[in-house]
Amino acid sequence: MHFDLITIFPNFFSGPFDHGVLRRAIQTGTVSVASHDLRQFTHDRHRTVDDRPFGGGEGMVLKAEPISDALASIHIGLKAGRDTSRESVVLLSAQGRPFTQAVAHELAALDRVVFICGRYEGVDERVNELYCDRELSIGDYVLSGGELAAAVIVDSVVRLLPGVLGNPDSAKFESFGAEDTGNAHEPGAVPPSTHGSGGLLDYPHYTRPAEFQGVPIPDVLQGGNHEQIRRWRRQMSLEKTFRNRPELLEGTTLSKADQAFLRKLREQ
Ligand code: SAM
């Protein structure tokens, strides 16, 4: 999979992409990344990429022409004539559609993603209209540039690519993991996964020592009863989701046992 990043700070990404899973994916050739310096696509002495907003107001706006030229240099034309089923041009924007694990899966199915990193007050809207098939926000807050958002998205997409994580199940059985229907619909059944999959948050993890600052790990994790461990993990996933992200429960398949457990939590 290939990522292009259009930015006024092309060296920004050497830090985030130079460690751990991402670095390995790049080294093994599963992923390639190219940063494109927007200033290279300007034609004036000062390499001007921005201008004042029409209508007045604060700040500056990234101009459309350098971005259009940068896109042309990597053979990206107008959205109207492009096959968006294998590649996507993404505008990073606080006004965008929320970036979620589901969108990460959508992007991971493509061959190529091009990111346009905004700065200042943002990007001339005609770039969005003419070139971008996705406008994505990584959260309800305002960053000073799209570079961090692009790095976040690349990281979460790359770990979904086949062969990138040592254990392919890791990405399936973690927070927001794929729906795990299994036997969840049977009365009282516990889903076969030991994990917080099916759109829930992950359950809590513990490692050695078994006691830390007087706090022991939960007894069930020492007992070796895998059925009990699975049931406990499912309940912890439900509880974390209930306490921190209750809206996620709406879209989750819940067994009768799950529902009974949630009822108890609500009554507390
Ligand atoms: N005037 C914009 C607004 O109020 O929505 C904020 C512009 S922000 C200072 C500069 C750039 O940072 C944006 O063009 C966008 O590329 C990026 N950015 C800021 N917040 C973001 C977010 N939550 N997700 C993705 N990109 C973001």
Image (tube, grey):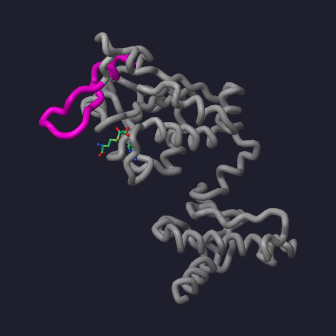
Residue toward you, 69 or 85: 69
Residue extending furthest bottom?
A: 267
Image spot of residue 34 (x, y percent)? 53, 22
Image spot of residue 250 (x, y percent)? 47, 69
Image spot of residue 197 (x, y percent)? 63, 61
Classify the position of ligand 1 by quadrant: top left, top right, bottom left or bottom right: top left
Residue 15 position by quadrant:
top right
The residue depicted at 36 percent of the width and 15 percent of the height is 41
Magenta-tinted stretch: 50-72
The residue depicted at 46 percent of the width and 68 percent of the height is 247
Image spot of residue 85 (x, y percent)? 45, 32
Image quadrant holding the N terminus, namely top right
Residue 90 position by quadrant:
top left
The residue depicted at 81 percent of the width and 78 percent of the height is 219
- Asked if the stretch drawn in magenta spans residue 52, the answer is yes
The correct choice, above or below, for 137 with respect to 75 in the image is below
Residue toward you, 222 or 251: 222
The correct choice, above or below, for 62 with respect to 252 in the image is above
The residue depicted at 48 percent of the width and 51 percent of the height is 100
Left-right relation of 58 to 154 = left
Residue toward you, 266 or 44: 44
Residue 206 position by quadrant:
bottom right
Q: Is residue 71 visible?
A: no
